[in-house]
Image: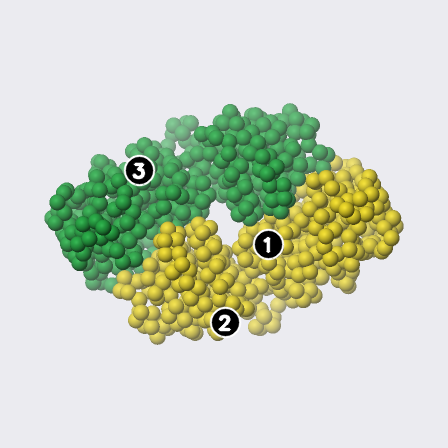
Chain colours: A green, B yellow
Amino acid sequence: MLNSTSKMEVFFKPKTVAIIGASEKPKFGTGTTTYLLNSKFKTYPVNINSDIIFGHKAYRNIKDVPENIDLAIIIVSNKFVLQAVKDCAEKNVKGIIIESAGFAETGTEKYALIQREIEKIAKESKIRIIGPNCIGVTNFHNEFTTSDMDFEQTIRGDVAVVAQSGVLGNVFIDWANSQGIGFSKAITIGNKVDVDEVDLLEYLNEDPETKVIALYLEGTKRGKMLKKVLAEMKKPVLILKNGRSDIGSRAVNSHTGSIAGNDKIYNALFNQFPHVFRVDNFYELFNIAHVFATQPLPKGRNVAIVTGSGSLGALACDEIRKQGLNLADLNKKTIDKIKDIIPNWVSIGGTIDLGPSMFETFIPSIKAIFKDDAVDCVLYIFSVPRVPLQRMASFALDGIKEQFKALKQSAEKSRKPCIIVSFGSRWVFDFVFKGASHYNSNLIIPIMTRINQAIKAFKMMHKYGETVQTGIK
Amino acid sequence: MLNSTSKMEVFFKPKTVAIIGASEKPKFGTGTTTYLLNSKFKTYPVNINSDIIFGHKAYRNIKDVPENIDLAIIIVSNKFVLQAVKDCAEKNVKGIIIESAGFAETGTEKYALIQREIEKIAKESKIRIIGPNCIGVTNFHNEFTTSDMDFEQTIRGDVAVVAQSGVLGNVFIDWANSQGIGFSKAITIGNKVDVDEVDLLEYLNEDPETKVIALYLEGTKRGKMLKKVLAEMKKPVLILKNGRSDIGSRAVNSHTGSIAGNDKIYNALFNQFPHVFRVDNFYELFNIAHVFATQPLPKGRNVAIVTGSGSLGALACDEIRKQGLNLADLNKKTIDKIKDIIPNWVSIGGTIDLGPSMFETFIPSIKAIFKDDAVDCVLYIFSVPRVPLQRMASFALDGIKEQFKALKQSAEKSRKPCIIVSFGSRWVFDFVFKGASHYNSNLIIPIMTRINQAIKAFKMMHKYGETVQTGIK
């Protein structure tokens, strides 16, 4: 199915849409129906029992719609799906998204059989089909979605998500947006009767809106093609692969009806490519993708740590060692500069621990650190307690805005990647977030809540950077 | 220093307090000063330059205070600390908390020497000293604190924290409170010139307000005593030990002036005791302590998983295997009961994946699962997307309240531990939190955001339960 990239456009930029199973009753799919009916995407509701849906003329069958249909979204009950697909084939639609569940994943032969018939139709008709058992796609740039998305709260960005699971298409997107992570496209592929990870990697490799791909995989039916397409990728790909244990595989099997392959084989596959990285959980997947999408590549493996807490600094040192990076050995000039401005009770050891002096000493320290050629990446650990911050809220917010302005300016000037790790309550996270967003610049600095993820991101960026620099894959 | 438990009371229930270095200027310690001056704890401000502080008569020296002082809090600059300690000794105070930093942790011989002199005074005078380089203590039950705590937002509970780092005494307490985790006492011990983890474990072992101890350790100076006191503990102890790598050790060293010991030795030490558990990060430390404090011990290793997402169910299965627990093999009766009520497209494989049917099928399913004697622990994974929840907000909230009522009643009746893992945005977390808090019962059900932590908690609870049941340590 190579060279089918142009055919995939219909899922992201359809001119005409039909929703088969559209209904006014509150159920799965009603949100998508109301959204699309009121959107710029020309949408026809189809329901065997209705003439009017939310004030729009409805059709008994997609074949009755008096216009060509680019994309059909099927949300009827599982027993009606096969007929709906046949109708779509007769109507000669370009693409179908089957969101309905209840096929191979149930473990019932009857429904697995229906799924195979749908698969056959896809092959014979050349209609591209996503699903079943999924929530379809979201295009964050033109705001087309089949996934009940609230675009008032989403962030446009350069990360594309491909996932064999619905939760990645809404629940985790929602979480990620609240952390400032922006997306280009999200595609959930469910039981994969036709469109799979291989097709989407090919498509996204050419997508100008996508810089990095976050892939959640439970198994593949096309191992060789996956290897081929991964080899050809010009963008970093982060992969979360579940179904590692036997009982896990059992659950994965009953989930999307595919066989979760042997974990070691997947590891060997992913490890072949310097631009493919395996991550351990959903949070890592999105946080590290965000770093790839927003930060310049580091020139080396030396990480400087700026912290207000010695303990958290120590923890970061542990992680740097564990991940095979170096703690930056600051030039004497930099240390002298910092020692000049900090009180005598501040520690400049392995890490730069400014302690509670942070508010006065941060700006000159951070400038000196970014300038230091012994520094390739900067980790800033923010761990100021909520209560004193709240007490001096307006003053503190002004202070933090100035800090982040200096941080962003230094990072931009030096072209070095930077990550903030923020600890504490939501109030503190929001405070940091507000401070970091204030100074308007093209540079976004990722904010996380885990030191190990930040260091892992630097490690992967460093590995990727070496590949890009040498041109060797 | 055994049998000194009663002497420790002065740190948590002082009748009279002096703050040496109290000041109206906004600086470290000002929050504590204003709080204590307006609290039920009789507090005398001491400042060499002031007669009045925040409307209260101030004293030039602690020796001038016309009453015996139980506890002196020292927040003056490092160069004045030694003299303040000497004054306290003359005044014959019972306890001192030195919050000022700038001693052995700076790596400067001059300040390390001062620290040793303070140590000598502690030994000779029998005055108990906490610190320096810490933020002291909080007693959440009587609301005594030296740590700038906002008791409107704290939660009383049964978890005690002992930490060689200030961030555990405020930043992480603040985070934990926002997750519903309650505390009895928090003590930060800094450079440990006198009071250390050994003293506090002894004290907390007898403390009726504490059920479980969360200990953050960078190193110990009393390995043998630590081993002895750990052996004698009647309560579970969770330990986060940092300073694992060489460069990490360097930073730890410069932080609290103690030598981070060899990681393997610590592992061997902790592994001797079935009631001592090593955790990997701060979030785990508090989340798992919360489970110990609130949940009954499981009778076996069989975990049932209730989920709306097959992928997250699969992930939980992986973790169960990884941690050496079993996925509960439900009785046929239970499966039949659930199959009776769920739509045909729901999967009952390894996990109970109710999919979007969750709202209708949850209550009878959860009741049957808790009743099943093949189930020892229940994990409920909540991953409903925000947008549809918000759309049907009031209806959904009523639904979730009923769900959690059934969950709590079933958990209470069956005396089986339960953990909720909630994915998604803060809105969803708050929604779950509100639902879970609504049904007033003595039972608190912990809510986390990571499946691996929940499974780890069950594993540790199971190990601890086996010990308690057999009586063998």
Q: Measuring from the top left, give residue B471's x and y in whole percent.
A: 60, 72
Mark whose residue sits in front, 2 or 1: 1
Q: Is residue B297 above or below residue B102?
A: below
Is the residue marked by circle 1 packed among few (<14), some (14-19), or many (20+) residues within 10 Å? few
Under tag 3, what secondary structure?
loop
Q: Pointer 3 and pointer 2: residues touching (CB < 8 Å)? A: no
Give the distance between the C-alpha atoms of the residues marked 2 and 1, in whole angstroms. Answer: 27 Å
Q: Chain of mark 3?
A: A
Q: Type of residue at label 2? A: Glu
Q: Measuring from the top left, give residue A198's x and y in whole percent.
A: 28, 42
| Res. B22 visible in picture | no
Quadrant including the C terminus of chain B: bottom right
Which residue is rendered at x = 57% and y = 25% of the image? A371
Q: Is residue A255 left or right of residue A422?
A: left
Q: Is residue A196 above or below residue B468?
A: above
User: Residue at label 2?
Assistant: B412
Is the residue marked by circle 3 packed among few (<14), some (14-19), or many (20+) residues within 10 Å? some
Give the distance between the C-alpha atoms of the residues marked 3 and 2, in whole angstroms. Answer: 50 Å
Q: Earlier in the sequence, mark 2 or mark 1?
A: 1
For the residue pair A306 and A406, the one nearer the viewer reads as: A406
Q: Measuring from the top left, give residue B19's x and y in whole percent.
A: 77, 48
Q: Chain of mark 1?
A: B
Q: Is residue B284 left or right of residue B336?
A: right
Which residue is rendered at x = 52% and y = 27% of the image? A409
Q: Type of residue at label 1? A: Gln
For the residue pair A79 and A316, the one nearer the viewer reads as: A79
Give the distance between the C-alpha atoms of the residues marked 1 and 3, in whole angstroms. Answer: 42 Å
User: Residue at label 3?
Assistant: A142
Q: Is residue B58 left or right of residue A37?
A: right
